Amino acid sequence: MQLERSSHGKVNLILNILGKRPDGFHELETVLQPVPLQDRLRFRREGKSVVLTCSDSNLPADESNLVHRAATAFLRAARISEGVRIELEKNIPMAAGLGGGSGNAAATLLGLNELFDAPLAVGALHQIASNLGSDVPFFLADGPALATGRGEEIERLESFPVLRNVSILLFHPGFGISTPWAYRKLADFPQAVQGRSGRARELVRALQQGSLADAAAHFYNSLEAPALHKYPILDLYQEFLRAHGATVALMSGSGSTTFALVERSADAEKLARDFRENFGDSGWMKVLALGGSGI
Ligand code: C5P
């Protein structure tokens, strides 16, 4: 029996870092919005070990791969001695701040739980997910969420009315940013580690009523401090996007993807053309309907 699942991406509408914790992680509050990008995963019960293949040769398919780690952790927790074969088809850019790897890991936990007739309860899956990475628990369900702690404490939210007809433009410049690097570099930007608690909930309220323009001032990302300092081009992208029709332009997660929110889809298409004309054809770009919902 083969099971096929897709895993989507996310952007952080706000990522507000509140301080450094004794365990080395950072305390934060973030609003995560699913975006309809899709990696595909195929699972089959086979052999005695975890065998992973990946469509993108840039991504190691060995034990370091988050999908491999998720499968190993699942089989151990469920006390299953059988093996699995997993094929991963990558479309979401990596080291991009779009949660591709985290989404793959969550899809693996959910897919294997189905393939082996649900040996693990939701709580156990959540526990494994948060051990794999701070963003993984978010991807165990669809729809937007407010996340706190190091990102693993999830409050599910209704889709945001303000985003219902909004288009999102995503641009990945072709270089990635390592998440540990971005957090480490925060040490050089003390202001960025001392966010005021409550800002994420203010953004949530603004997205539940009013307009995108009214909510725009609430979008924020603490990790832009190190990222835009090292890569000033990211700042230029945002300036250009705002000057050419985007209501919001921000970096997602630890970067390097920049996203722009545009109220009309025709304007988003035009913005994409203008952006290409100005910055050239390199890099990866997508224009998608956000839908204000999950996937
Ligand atoms: O949890 P995840 O594997 O995504 O984290 C990658 C790295 O990012 C961590 O090892 C840590 O250095 C940093 N991080 C952090 N605070 C968070 C999330 C991640 O310092 N809340």
Image: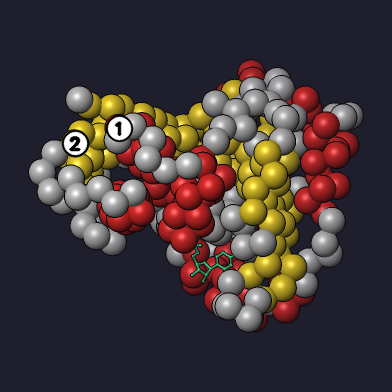
Instruction: Give residue 166's position: percent from left, percent from top.
Output: 69, 25
Task: Give the residue drawn at x 73%, y 41%.
Answer: 248
Taking 17 as reference, is 43 left or right?
left
Instruction: Give residue 204's position: percent from left, percent from top.
Output: 80, 41
Q: Dot 1 lies on which element? A: helix
Q: Which amino acid, by three-letter code, is at mark 2? A: Arg
Q: Is the shortest distance between ligand 1 and the CB of mark 2 under 8 Å?
A: no
Q: Which amino acid, by three-letter code, is at mark 1? A: Leu
Q: Is residue 72 visible?
A: yes
Q: Is the shortest distance between ligand 1 and the CB of mark 1 under 8 Å?
A: no
Task: Give the residue drawn at x 30%, y 55%.
Answer: 76
Counting residues from the start of the chain, the first of labels 1 and 2 encountered is 2
Instruction: Give residue 63's position: percent from left, percent from top.
Output: 24, 60
Q: Which of the 4 quarters of the picture holds residue 291?
A: top right
The residue lying toward the viewer, choosing from 53 and 47, is 47
Residue bearing the label numbered 1: 115
Q: Quadrant of the N terminus?
A: top left
Q: Is residue 166 visible?
A: no
Please determine whether, in this image, residue 119 is positioned above or below residue 197: above
Task: Give the residue drawn at x 50%, y 55%.
Answer: 127
Instruction: Give residue 77's position: percent from left, percent from top.
Output: 36, 54
Q: Dot 2 lies on which element? A: strand
Q: Tell me the crowding category of disc 2: few under 14, some 14 to 19, or many 20 or more residues within 10 angstroms, Cα based.
A: some
Taking 255 as reference, is 194 left or right?
right
Q: Tell me the crowding category of disc 1: few under 14, some 14 to 19, or many 20 or more residues within 10 angstroms, Cα based.
A: some
The residue lying toward the viewer, choosing from 67 and 111, is 111
Please determine whether, in this image, residue 86 is positioned above or below residue 72: above
The residue lying toward the viewer, choosing from 138 and 120, is 120
Residue bearing the label numbered 2: 45
Q: Quadrant of the C terminus?
A: top right
The answer to whether mark 1 and mark 2 are in CB contact below 8 A is yes
